[in-house]
Each structure stands twice: as structure tokens, then as C-alpha cells.
Image: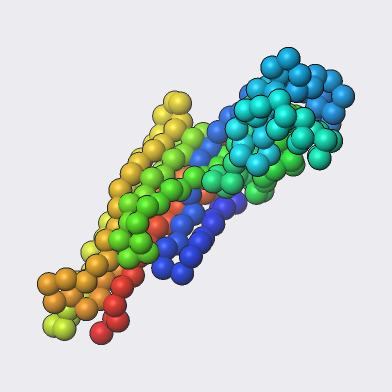
Amino acid sequence: MRTTQATTGVLLVFCAVFALTVGVATATAGGGNKTGQTCYKGHYVDYADPSTGKAFTTEAACTASLAHTGVLYPVSTGICFDRSWALIEDLNNGADGSATSGAPCATFVMGGGSLAGVQLTTSGTPISFSYTVNAFAVNFLAQNNNSDVCTADGCNASGGTGISSIFSPFKYSTSGGLDCSLRGGTVYRDAVVSWNFTTLGGHGMAITVSCVNGTHP
């Protein structure tokens, strides 16, 4: 089983999971629509803007993108161009759990493939922040929580692990927060929460959020 993990930042580290089945597009086979329907007569809403992953909002934007790239991708592949997601090839069309995005991702989906991916949003500071994690096309979760709080007199560590099955429609969403602020004589504090998912294609994906503050005695 291949595990995909992404990290960012120094104090805030994450890897998120989100699994999605995207409908097969009806555009020209072999990589988008090059010579079929164009952006005219309102058809621009049928295509994904590669800069946002959402449907084009104007005919001009659609036409400009087509002129620049020479290809349009159906809006059903929009998640491939949404940079807030990390994606893997999860099922069908030769899926092997490898990371994918952009045009190769869209071509994979148009060929009948299904994706798994991750999305994590945060708000706050590296020391104290809220987070939201989303996942879909996942059927199993192992979650770990660990923290360490130290005063001049010593440290107190705590943690736990939970496992659960995820049932149809195989989606997961949770929100929470971590706070590593020092108060009440605390000289050091860290906290870590991780989500380890198994996708419908049997691949592994992991999300970790963490914070740390102070000097460990």
C-alpha cells in the first residue's frame, strides 16, 4: 500500500486526504477539447479554468485560455486544477496511487479514472490555529492525538489512537484547532493530530497538523 504525505511550513505541518470520484467528461479524447465545442454561446461554463479549478465565468476568459493552451478541459475535472487539493490516481485507468495534478490528472479522469486527494485549510498562527480537513472515497481511518506540556517542575505527555470505518458515500470532514500558547507557568507545549486514511483503491493517505512553542526542559 502506497502512502502519500505532504508537509508544509516549519511549525505547522500537514498532509491531508480527500478522495473523490469525478465524472468522466465528454470532451474530445486524448486530453481535453481542442477542436470540438468552443467557449461560445454560453458553453464556457462547461470548461474548467486551469487557474482556479472552477468553471469559466466569462467567454473572454475561456477563449483566452484556449488560445494560450490550445485545449479545454471539462468542468468535471476542475479539482485537478484546484491547488488546495493534493491528489492521487486511486482507481481504474491504470491507477497506481501516484500523485497527480493539472493536465495529466484531467486526462486520467477523462479516461475513466477516479481520484483520491487531500485538502486542509487553516486559520490563525503557527502556534494557535483552527483547521478543517476533508476526505472522500476513503473507507478507513486511524487517528492519533499526542501532546506534551512542560513546566519548570516537569512534563506531562498525553495521547491516544482511534480507528473507525467510513461508510458510503465514503466522505470525511472534521474541524478543530491546536493551541500551543504558553500560560500558567508552562515553558513548553507541543501538540500533534494525524489522520491516516485508506482509500477505496487501497492506497494510504495521511494528514498531520502540529504546533510547538517554547524550549523543552
**Residue 140 position in % (x across, y down):** 43, 40
Give whichever of 188, 169 is nearer the camera. Answer: 188
**Residue 84 position in % (x across, y down):** 54, 46
- Report the number of numbered marks: 0
Quadrant hosting residue 209: bottom left
Farthest front residue in view:
60
**Residue 21 position in % (x across, y down):** 58, 29
Farthest top residue in view:
41
Residue 194 vs residue 25: left or right? left
Residue 49 vs residue 34: left or right? left
In this picture the colour scheme is: rainbow
Give whichever of 11, 200 is nearer the camera. Answer: 11
**Residue 112 position in % (x across, y down):** 71, 27
In the rendered image, is residue 29 in sight? Answer: no
Quadrant hosting residue 215: bottom left
Q: Residue at x 69, y 17 (%)?
A: 42
Q: Residue at x 41, y 68 (%)?
A: 11
Q: Residue at x 45, y 52 (%)?
A: 207
